[in-house]
Image (tube, helix red, strand yellow):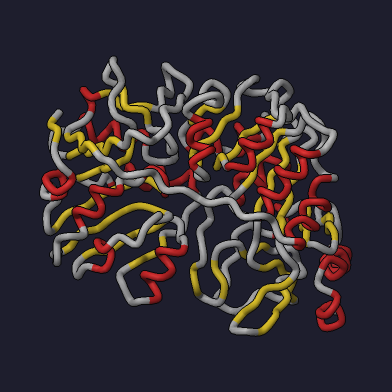
Amino acid sequence: MRELSAREAAALVGSRDSLGVPLGPGQPPAFLTALGERERFEDLQVFGALLVAPYALFTRPGVRLRSGFFGPVERALAAAGHAIEFVPADFRRFARVARELAPRVMATAATPPDAQGWCSLALHAGATVDELRRCGRDPARVLVVEALPRLPRTLGLPPQHPHALHVSEIDVLVPSDRDPIELPESPPSEVERAIARHAARFIPDGATLQTGIGGVPDAIAMLLAEGPGGDYGVHSEMYTTGLMRLDRAGKVSNARKGIHPGLSIVTFAMGTRELYDWLGGPGRERVRFLPVDQVNDPAIASRCNALVSINGALAVDLFGQIAADALEGREHSGIGGHEDFVTGAAFSEGGRSLICLPSTAQVRGARVSRIVAALAPGSCVTTPRHQVDVVVTEYGAAELAGRSVRERREALRAVAHPDFRAALE
């Protein structure tokens, strides 16, 4: 292992090369910043997802990002005409995609080595763990680890899933003073609170929770934390500040979840500094990070007791088809674990799948219905109609599973905004 500065490590990437980085909080900030100081590349292909900062690298001539999940940064870069391409696949399949692409350079954020030489992968296990290790074993490839001291030292389930890299596996260690990316909390809106109240009636005591990102999942976690129920479990792609607050309220025991009893199982975390301090402190033994194929696999998730998946959508048509990532030819986010957790909940004993969304949105200054007669041309179905269980808006819950096409239309119209129901009829 060599210890290099971010600029020295960036110099190891060729003008014509390939680079792989993890999703979101696993990205190495100083290393990517140093790469962006170079003005031009011949052909640098970068494989990643959910950029957490507008790195100059992705504005440079000759650089192409293949992203598995768009966030605000990818959307802005694509709108500005830079070479940002979306790779359609659910999160679980990206482990295979990473293996097939086999970027010559792999780079990740991690904690500094402990006394035994282990660097915890901190906030991200995801789809890159195996490829990081394969890269480290291959003398023709380069594994770069950027060591951020303020990352929490989190745990996996050793020996099979240690959630850490040993210095003997690492080619280049980059000491860094950067802070990990944070997601600030914001109070839920009245619409989000109303959606949370309708969703909460589908969450029994002892349920296992999977929540996505955003105001609605946080509002649901807040409502459950303040409510009389409890004994919940967590088996979730993402661990959030809201789930931490639910645990700290004494509502999470993981005693009845069926698999990994006593432990909340996740594949990445993103939230506030308070969350990161908790994950590296009191929550360290309670929350464990596993690779995405161990978290998002419907066959594994369905073994959880009463798995309740809580996810969002951009639009829902009257057949019950869910567009959660792309509308009218424009990629807004990605597929992630959407369909995997809808499926896993469907086959969990007592499980329910909730698709939660406000009934309207503002588009180019006009209010539009998000319950639509038909998806607009160029929109993509993220989760097909036959997988969908419950659609929740601030006006109620439309239960679709087992309903006829006619009954689905009626149930969905009933939870649309009143101003649009006549047009939908």
Q: Is residue 141 left or right of residue 425?
A: left
Residue 360, image x, y percentages: 72, 72
Which residue is pictured at 52% across the width and 45% down the height? Answer: 271
Residue 52, image x, y percentages: 40, 54
Asked whether residue 395 appears in the rendered view, the answer is yes
The quadrant where residue 301 appears: top right
Residue 261, image x, y percentages: 65, 20
Is the residue 261 above or below the residue 151 in the image?
Answer: above
The quadrant where residue 201 appears: top right
The quadrant where residue 318 appears: bottom right
Which residue is pictured at 21% across the width and 44% down the height? Answer: 105
Which residue is pictured at 28% across the width and 15% down the height? Answer: 116
Q: Nearer the viewer, residue 416 or 31?
A: 31
Residue 186, image x, y percentages: 61, 55
Quadrant where the N terminus is found in the figure: top left
Asked whether residue 143 appears in the rendered view, the answer is no
